[in-house]
Image (cartoon, rainbow, N blue to C red):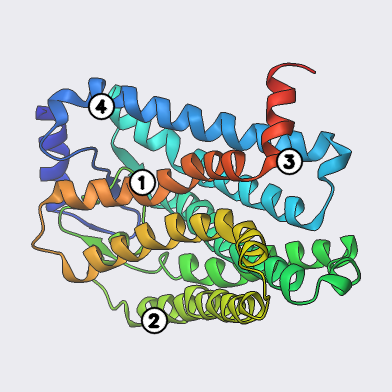
């Protein structure tokens, strides 16, 4: 613990445009980091193996070459990106107490972290649109969601992410940082980094707000609108059994939306309004935000989607 305290003392008396930040593991439980790393490793292994299997199954099995499964492969790719972008720093802290990170490395990590998060949000919108078309206008489904149009949607998500996240992170470079540059999490998170700056951050805050509006602020209403149209279409079906059968095709997507947006909104609220909350709460919320979607999405889609379940079983059994 002495080297860390010395680093914090040094950082506490410096003002720099090239700072070193100190990442935080599980506050108050530093003595148990080696044991805490075991469930983290299990979760990372589950996320990596589950999403990799779904990606491999969709790529290799011709029967899964459908719009819904293409979007699922995009979701798995985004989940893999989220997992890998923070795994090295989190495990580095838990295993080796390697908690220092430079501003440049922090910016690179945030580019991938926030980039994959924004991409995942966009994919969830595309999946909501897919379900909306399939239920509300099934006869035109294949003519609307062609392979070319799906590729266009994928490229649009990537461009949208780069255009939004790039300027947001470049605005960090001119800032001065002073005081104890101790971050709240085991990875770099933009709102967390901004709080440590001792120069004017109005441009950063405005850019962050614009990004929030153009991602979550646009994506969430689009998903809600899609489900309003879906519910309206489902309620027009006379047979209760048929209504249940049709709406059950949306259960997996609703689960994916819930496990992505609920932890994200909770973490944002904790950062904005929960400054007096124990630091361990911040840490738990931050890890839930990044680990829940990659771990649970493959499980949800494997359990609720028969074609995916059969494809993964055939891969595991080598049939």
Q: Quadrant of residue 86?
A: top left
Q: CA distance from mark 3 to mark 1?
A: 36 Å
Q: Residue at x 27, y 43 (%)?
A: 23
The residue lying at 40 percent from left, 69 percent from top is: 174
User: Circle 1 is placed at which residue position?
Assistant: 187
**Residue 312: which quarter of the image?**
top right
Q: Residues within 10 Å of mark 1 (few under 14, many from 20)?
A: many
- Which is nearer the eye, 262 or 282? 262
Mark before the other along the chain sequence, 2 or 3: 2
Q: Which mark is residue 203?
A: 2
Q: Is residue 263 left or right of residue 24?
A: right
Report if residue 314 is visible in the image.
yes
Q: CA distance from mark 2 to mark 1?
A: 23 Å
Which label lies toward us, 3 or 1?
Answer: 3
Residue 48 vs 203, above or below: the answer is: above
Q: Nearer the viewer, mark 2 or mark 3?
A: 3
Circle number at residue 253: none
Question: In terms of sequence position, does the residue under pointer 4 or pointer 2 come before the other?
Answer: 4
Q: Where residue 235 appears, x then y in whole percent?
A: 61, 78
Q: Is residue 144 in sight in this rendering?
A: no
Q: Give how far across and how far down residue 149 sits, in percent.
A: 85, 68
* Residue position marked by numbered label 4 in the rendering: 36
**Circle 1 SS class:** loop
Mark positioned earlier in the residue sequence (2 or 1): 1
Label at residue 307 = 3
**Foreground mark, 2 or 1?**
1
Disc 4/disc 1 C-alpha distance (Å): 16 Å
Q: Is tag 4's residue or tag 1's residue first in the polypeptide sequence?
A: 4
């Amino acid at each position: 613990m002495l080297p860390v305290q010395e680093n914090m003392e040094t950082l506490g008396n410096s003002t720099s445009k090239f700072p070193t930040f100190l990442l935080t593991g599980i506050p108050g439980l530093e003595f148990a980091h080696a044991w805490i790393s075991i469930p983290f490793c299990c979760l990372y292994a589950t996320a990596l193996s589950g999403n990799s299997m779904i990606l491999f199954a969709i790529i290799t099995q011709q029967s899964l070459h459908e719009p819904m499964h293409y979007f699922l492969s995009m979701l798995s790719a985004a989940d893999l990106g989220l997992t890998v972008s923070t795994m090295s720093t989190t495990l580095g802290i838990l295993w080796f107490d390697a908690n220092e990170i430079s501003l440049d490395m922090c910016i690179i990590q945030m580019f991938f972290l926030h980039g994959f998060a924004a991409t995942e949000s966009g994919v969830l919108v595309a999946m909501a649109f897919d379900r909306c078309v399939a239920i509300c206008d099934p006869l035109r489904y294949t003519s609307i969601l062609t392979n070319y149009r799906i590729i266009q949607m994928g490229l649009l998500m990537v461009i949208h992410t780069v255009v939004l996240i790039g300027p947001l992170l470049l605005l960090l470079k001119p800032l001065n940082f002073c005081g104890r540059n101790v971050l709240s999490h085991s990875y770099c998170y933009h709102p967390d980094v901004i709080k440590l700056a001792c120069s004017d951050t109005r441009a950063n805050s405005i850019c962050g707000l614009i990004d929030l509006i153009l991602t979550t602020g646009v994506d969430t209403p689009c998903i809600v609108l899609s489900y309003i149209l879906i519910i309206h279409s489902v309620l027009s079906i006379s047979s209760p059994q048929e209504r249940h059968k049709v709406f059950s095709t949306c259960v997996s997507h609703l689960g994916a939306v819930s496990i992505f947006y609920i932890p994200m909104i909770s973490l944002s609220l904790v950062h904005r309004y929960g400054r007096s909350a124990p630091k361990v709460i911040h840490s738990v919320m931050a890890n839930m935000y990044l680990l829940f979607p990659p771990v649970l999405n493959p499980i949800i889609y494997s359990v609720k989607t028969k074609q995916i379940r059969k494809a993964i079983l055939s891969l595991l059994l080598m049939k």
